[in-house]
Image (cartoon, helix red, strand yellow):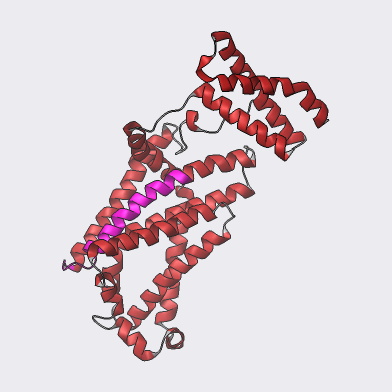
Amino acid sequence: MDLDVYVTAHRAEWDRLDHLLRRGSHLTGAEADELVALYQRTATHLSLIQSSAPDPMLTARLTQLVARARATVTGTRRASWRDAVRFLTAGFPAAVYRSRHWWIPTAVLSTLLAAFIGWWIGTHPEVQASIAAPEELRQMTRPGGEYETYYSSHPAASFAAQVWTNNAQAAAMCLVLGAFLCVPVLWILFLNMLNLGVGLGLMSSAGRLDTFLGLVLPHGLLELTAVFVAAGTGLRLGWTLIDPGPLSRRTALAKQGRAALGMALGLALVLFVSGVIEGFVTPSGLPTWARISIGIAAELAFLAYVYVLGGRAARAGETGDVESPDRSAELPTAA
């Protein structure tokens, strides 16, 4: 393509489209029809230029022009309670359900890794000695030690807020860093499983594994599930860069990225629930069986939410993506 010749041939159409957009709501019926036709043509021109002779300045101008025309043609829509209800009852659970082939293996392999690390530390005193001095280990694992007082070291409300912030940040990092391939997500997962494995190993070596599980399981089941979902989604997003399937890499990444953004919002709500449990239930005076039962109930409720509502929505065609009017325009190939 001779870019200069192409620009000369179509500049008048772009200028005309810009002129019509500046007139806004004062267009006649014929001018409105002309604007739609020019929008389609300009979108096609942009697609051809991007694929054949990309020029940064021209591409930026046409991209802005197409975006303005699309906003004028399709209009804007305010978010409503209907959007929130649709997101919570269909969009988010369907996105989690569709990602299950990624986050379930992630959960299984990560749990096995944490168990292996715990076994390794618990059965090898020399590894324990490399973590901390014997007296420090006793301070951490004794009754009333650091592992137990951690959950009651701050007021419940502020502790729950702190936990929610930290976990939401970790989940968001998994989702965002997935766009930079899979290694950062795997590293975040490894650090989380390492921390869990160290606790398992040290407390089991002190003969207090039951106490440790009684402190971790009430909130940890739901919390770790949310982290696994975020990590699995991040890995799926990273894999999309490697293998976009039948779609173009840009289109596939945009589709998965929009769904991942919605999942970030939904997982923030899930982690809020786990933070409330960690702040108010874990350090409470309830019997261990009661605290663990609350954690199991929260986990089962989330899984039922995903598999019942999410499965039903996914089978109905829901993908977790935003509604079509809110997506970026897919450039037509012919005007």
**Residue 152 drawn above or below residue 322:** below
Taking the magenta stretch, the answer to whether it contains residue 212 is: no
Q: Say whether residue 302 is visible.
A: yes
277, 41: nearer the viewer: 41
Q: Which quadrant would residue 143 be assigned to in this image?
A: bottom left
**Residue 97 drawn above or below residue 196:** above
Taking the magenta stretch, the answer to whether it contains residue 274 is: yes
Q: Residue at x 40, y 47 (%)?
A: 265
- How far from the left and from the top, in percent, is residue 222? 33, 57
Q: Residue at x 38, y 42 (%)?
A: 93
Q: Residue at x 43, y 56 (%)?
A: 171
- How far from the left and from the top, in percent, is residue 9? 78, 22
212, 163: nearer the viewer: 163
Q: Which quadrant would residue 198 be assigned to in this image?
A: bottom left
Query: Is residue 58 shown left or right of residue 320?
Result: right
Q: Main secondary structure of the magenta part?
A: helix
Image quadrant in which the N terminus is located: top right
Count of residue discs: 0
Query: Is residue 325 shown left or right of residue 270?
Result: right
- How far from the left and from the top, in percent, is residue 48? 72, 30
60, 24: nearer the viewer: 24
Q: Which quadrant would residue 195 be assigned to in this image?
A: bottom left
Image quadrant in which the C terminus is located: top right
Q: Say whether residue 330 is visible.
A: no
Task: Magenta stretch: give its range.
Answer: 261-287
- How far from the left and from the top, in percent, is residue 12? 72, 20
**Residue 190 drawn above or below residue 238:** below
